[in-house]
Structure formats: structure tokens, C-alpha cells
Image: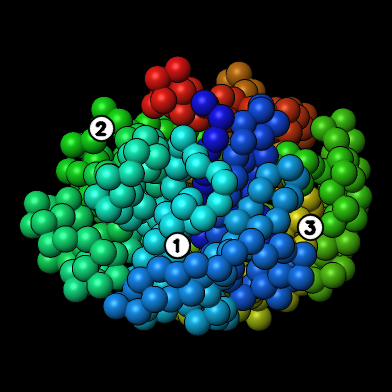
Amino acid sequence: MERILFVATEGLPFVKSGGLADVIGSLPNELRRKGYDVRVVLPLFKKIAINWHYKFTFLRTYTVNINFEEKQVNLFYYIYNDVTYYFIEHRDYFEREGLYGYEDDGERFAFFQKAVLEMLNQIDYFPEIMHCHDWHTGMIPCMCKENFNHDYRYRSIKHVYTIHNLAFQGNFGRLMLGPCLGLGDYVFDNGNVRFDGGISFMKAGIVYSDKITTVSPTYAQEIKTTQYGERLESVLRFREADLCGVVNGIDTEMWNPKTDSLITKNYTSRTYKKGKAENKKALQEKLGLEVNEDVMLIGLVSRLTWQKGIYLIIEQLFNICNQPVQLVFLGSGEAGLEEKLREAEVSNPGKVCFYCGYNEELSHEIYAASDLFLMPSLFEPCGISQLISMRYGTLPLVRETGGLKDTVIPYNKFTGEGTGFSFSNYNSNDMMHVLWEAINLYYNEPDAWKQLVKNAMNKDVSWEQSAEFYIGIYKELVGE
Ligand code: ADP
């Protein structure tokens, strides 16, 4: 087994809106290093076009049928870090300001998936494994098995489907089944893609794939329950023999405090104290916070949505601000949350900073400068931010859910073990209790804090182990 095609909608360094891009930007590299011919196919979004298009090589043009019209696909490729990336260009569908959230998302991503399947007919690369990610690619195993079954090459492909976030499902009206997806009514009638009277791309991915993975073992268990299953729990339980959780890694070259060129002072686990102090001072100056290298700096880099537990922080903002700490928030999202964080900044000058927006460089500076990273998520399939923060010696304070539970070892005051702090119930008082514990430890037990930082920085957050796990899955599927 050699050839694995990743199908996704975002991936670094080309385009990113969340953790999916981190995964698509790093797992293929690790598999490539291990000798596999991994390639990746992405839509050519405007954000990619602006920065990268001039570097891409045109490969060919072909058409796919959507809504009874032949729509043109322009296929480009680019080799980055020894991995071949294909880009599906269609200006009407993809050259828009945002990536997702348009009325015709169903049609846009139906087009993308059809274009990917047809692409295999057009190029001299036929994968043994197609590894699809999240709802935007969930129809691929279904269309491949239903529409291409007569072709031995397509029939031989094994499908792996990874759920990065079950909350986003790609649910649309059933009318697009025939005209957009080219599927017969029977896949609706037999329930394979049916959901709430319409169709679900996510459900189709779960039903039709040979193996379903999600991004942590705990989330793999959680999504089989009503609490976390987003109404797909029974489908997931039906497929549980083929469902497993594999924790994400991060690109440890890009996220490396020793070499990171976006931060003020590089450091290692031996020199972290001095390094953090300098990064902290630089960030405080930059953001208008009171310059004080001794104060505990708490960071947060996140989409501002209900999923991320931001409400717990807002509930306790008054109490948190009464502590000897500074807070820096980077993110954007729900207007109500943005407003609350803006208010906190205005009421606490020099102590709280809220940067509203997406800023890659600032995120590096926050990971490097902060002492503690807040991530009290309501649910968290894996979470990338806590992995990055541990790598930068910034102790994560997390709720014990999904990948947060699997990756952060909570501080044990009896043994001194741990790589961060955690609480179990989704309750702001419980979060506050642990935060007090962390603040106390930071100021009053610096040796214990130092040990936690070292543990965190020495934790293996690379892809090494998880990539082996995926290879095991691929090999099992092709019978090796
Ligand atoms: P999710 O994928 O649910 O958004 P993850 O923790 O898995 O959450 O991944 C989030 C990734 O996006 C991390 O790499 C984080 O640093 C980055 N990120 C989130 N918000 C911002 C922002 N406003 N600016 C820069 N990077 C961000």
C-alpha cells in the first residue's frame, strides 16, 4: 500500500480557519516522510488564489455535471514539502471572501466532491485509500460506491472518513440528490443519506466509509451518546466496530519555541523562564498591557463560539479580573461574545486585551508569552491549541472533554505530575476553583510550576505515534 489521497477543504500553509487546516498541513508530511505517496486535494479558495496561484502549475480542464449543466473544472497542482497538492478551481463557487457559510454550500461542495472523483480519471494517480475529512467530503465514499461501482479502479478504493467536528454536518434538502450529486432516490428511501427529511453529508460519510475515525479516543466514545452525538449517535453506534479515535499531532517544526521566527525570544525547556519573560514584555508593550514580567499572563486563542466554553469565562470575568493576572484574548465569532470581551477590555485597561480577528503571528506571540492557556470547551473533538500551548510551556487549563481529556494530564498536587490543569463539569465555579489553584501555584510554588512547564514542553505532541496508527488502519483496509 502506497497511495493515499487526502480530500479536505483547508490545509496549511494554503488556507486555515481552524484545527482541520493544522491536521491537513502536517499529517501528510509525516506520512510522506514514512515513505507513502500521499497527495492532498483542496478547493482553490480565493484566500489561496491571492497568495499562491502564481506558483501553481496548470494540469488540465474537464467538466462535471451539476444541476444539468456541464461546469468547468480547472485543475492545478503544486508540490510543497515533497507532498503534491491538487487544487480544484471554479471561480464562481470558490473565489469568495469566506470559505463556508453560503446559501449554496451544498452545491459548492457537491461540485468539489464530484470534481475530485472525476479528477482520478484525468490524472495518472489512482489512490488505494481515499481519506476524506469532515462533512464537505462526506459524499465521496457514497458517490464512489454508488456511481462508480462499474469501474474496477474506483471499486477497489478503500475509504477512511475522519470526523473533526460532528457539530458541522452539511445537511441539505433532498432535492439536490439527483441534480447535484447524481444519486438515485433509493439512497434517501433506504435511509443511507437521509436525515431530518433531507440529506446529510456527514451521515453519508459515516454510513459509506470503510473506516471512520475521529480525532481522539474520548470523543470517539462521546459521540455515541445523546449528549455529544448531535443526533447521529445511533448511526455511529451502528458503525462502532469500524469507529476509532486517533489523537491529532501538530507540526513540531512550525510550532517550535526554539526556532519560531515569529516570537521575540526563542527558548527551550531549559531557558523557558527567561524566554517567556522577554516574550511577555514584548507582547505587553505591543498590546498596551502594563509591562510586568512577573505578572501571570493568561492567553486564549480561539474561535469565539459556544463550543469553546467562552461563556464560562464571561461568567467569571469579574472574579478573574480581581486576581493578580493579565488576560489576552485573540479570536472572533459570535457578536455577543465579542461584545463582552470588548467590554472587559474597556473596563480593565492595562490588564485585559481583546484582539478581535484572526492573526497567525499574534497567535504565536500569545502562545510564547502566556503562562496559562484557557480552553474550557463544552466539547472538543481533539483541540490543537492545547497541544501548541504545551509545546510553548504555557500550561493549558481545560475542561475534561474529548481530546482535552486525552492530551492534558491534570496537575496532581501529591505527586507533582501533570502538564496542565483540568475540571470536569461544565460549570464556571469549577473552572474558577481550578484557576485559583493555578494562580496560587504560579505565585507560591514556583518550583512545582517549573516542573509542570518542563513536563508540558517535553510531552510528545508530534504526529509520530498517530501517523503510525493511521498507517495501521490503511494497511488493515487493503489487507496488508
Ligand atoms: P477548532 O478547529 O475547533 O477551531 P482547534 O484547537 O482544533 O480548534 O484549532 C484551532 C487552531 O486555530 C489553532 O491552531 C489556533 O491557534 C488557531 N486559531 C484559532 N483562532 C485563531 C485566531 N483568531 N487567530 C489565529 N489563530 C487562531
Which of 131/465 is in front?
A: 131
Provide the residue designation for mark 1: 115
Q: Is residue 297 left or right of residue 473?
A: right
Q: Earlier in the sequence, mark 1 or mark 3?
A: 1
User: Residue at 48% of width from left, 74% of height from top?
Assistant: 72
Which quarter of the figure is the C terminus placed in? top left
Residue 49's spot in the image, x, y percent?
67, 73
Residue 410's spot in the image, x, y percent?
55, 32
Q: What is the three-letter code of the residue carrying label 1?
A: Ala
Q: Quadrant of residue 438?
A: top right
Label 3 residue SS: helix
Residue 439's spot in the image, x, y percent?
65, 46
Which of 13/216 is in front?
A: 13
Judge the density around disc 1: few (<14), some (14-19), many (≥20) Cα neighbours within 10 Å.
many
Residue 370's spot in the image, x, y percent?
74, 52
Residue 85 in sight from this viewpoint:
yes
The image shows residue 163, relative to residue 211, as above or below, that is below
